[in-house]
Image: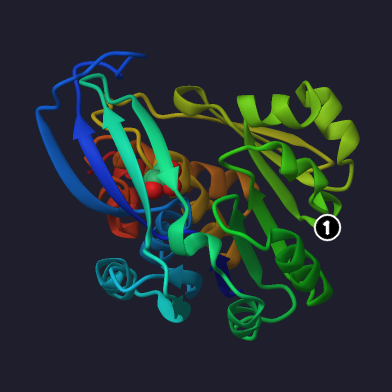
Amino acid sequence: MAKILNIGSLNLDYVYAVPHFVEAGETLLASRRDVFAGGKGLNQTVAAARAGAEVCHGGAVGADGDMLLDLLRDAGADVSAVARVDVPTGHAVIQVTPQGENAILILGGANRAVSPETVGIALEKVGPGDILLLQNEINGLDHIIRRAAQKGLRILFNPAPMEKAVKDLPLELLDTLIVNEGEGKALAGDMDALKAAYPNQKILLTQGRRGASLWTGSEVLFQPAFPVEAVDTTAAGDCFLGYYAAALAEGLPYAAALRLAAGASALSVQRQGAAPSIPVRGEVEAFLKGTY
Ligand code: RIB
């Protein structure tokens, strides 16, 4: 079984229950606030670990990051490549509506202070053929992608949150580019242009409540989302990607990996919070068998 390294963000999520997203000039009363572990990186590591993968997390937290490290350890992840830096831990302010929709504001904090030394320590944990998961919430991605490619890692990159600088990254070194429709559009205009721009990459398009499509180069696979009642969609995409990576690490075929990932994310949207909403493998298997 291949190992997974995820060099990614770790956030404290401040989650506010609101009747609707706050509008410009409006002061809005939230009915509650919860603090959860989150960050796209941490969520994906937790998902991969709960799926049963051997996973190491690389990144950085400040003095206030213990809760995040404890959660990663409890999930079974190796946190020895997470540095403690003199910058507050990254955080997110998340509004969640009664329909389960979210709007997220993030401050990078320690996630923007990931040093080349920390990256070097993290990359020592894996070897050729292993999987590297990346998102766009940390600094140093150009360096990380180039070093990981030299090392023969299979790089799965999810450029979220999208920004212009993503286009300048060496995306041609990726194994798989993972985008939602907005990110795909921002990168290339439309899916055909995206596929033409990155002809040697697999492209995984996540389509929220519709499902996900994977272009492997030789075939196109579509996995519909399972119809469930969502209470909070935060981290549903991260849960999907962590499970997908874990399934690939196990050697499952793409179709089976997509189905497992869709099952995991269907369970996660029925629970509150980011990392706490991510199910364990047994729950996902039961859901897929109809016995959950
Ligand atoms: O994808 C959800 C995550 O995005 C949240 O946990 C938040 O921290 C932001 O990184």
Q: Indicate whether 218 appears above or below 133.
A: above
Residue occupying the point 51% across, 70% down: 59
Residue 78 coordinates in the image, percent (x, y): 43, 79
Lateral position of residue 146 relative to residue 120, left or right:
right
Residue 38 coordinates in the image, percent (x, y): 35, 53
Residue occupying the point 55% across, 50% down: 257
The residue singled out by tag 1 in the image is 173
Whether residue 280 is visible to the viewer of this picture, yes or no, is yes
Identify the amino acid type marked 1. Answer: Leu
Using the image as rendered, state which of residue 27 and residue 236 is in the foreground.
27
Residue occupying the point 48% across, 75% down: 54
Residue 18 coordinates in the image, percent (x, y): 20, 23
Residue 157 coordinates in the image, percent (x, y): 66, 52
List the single residue furthest toward the front: 25
Q: Indicate whether 237 appears above or below 250.
A: above
Residue occupying the point 79% across, 51% down: 169
Residue 134 is drawn in which quadrant? bottom right
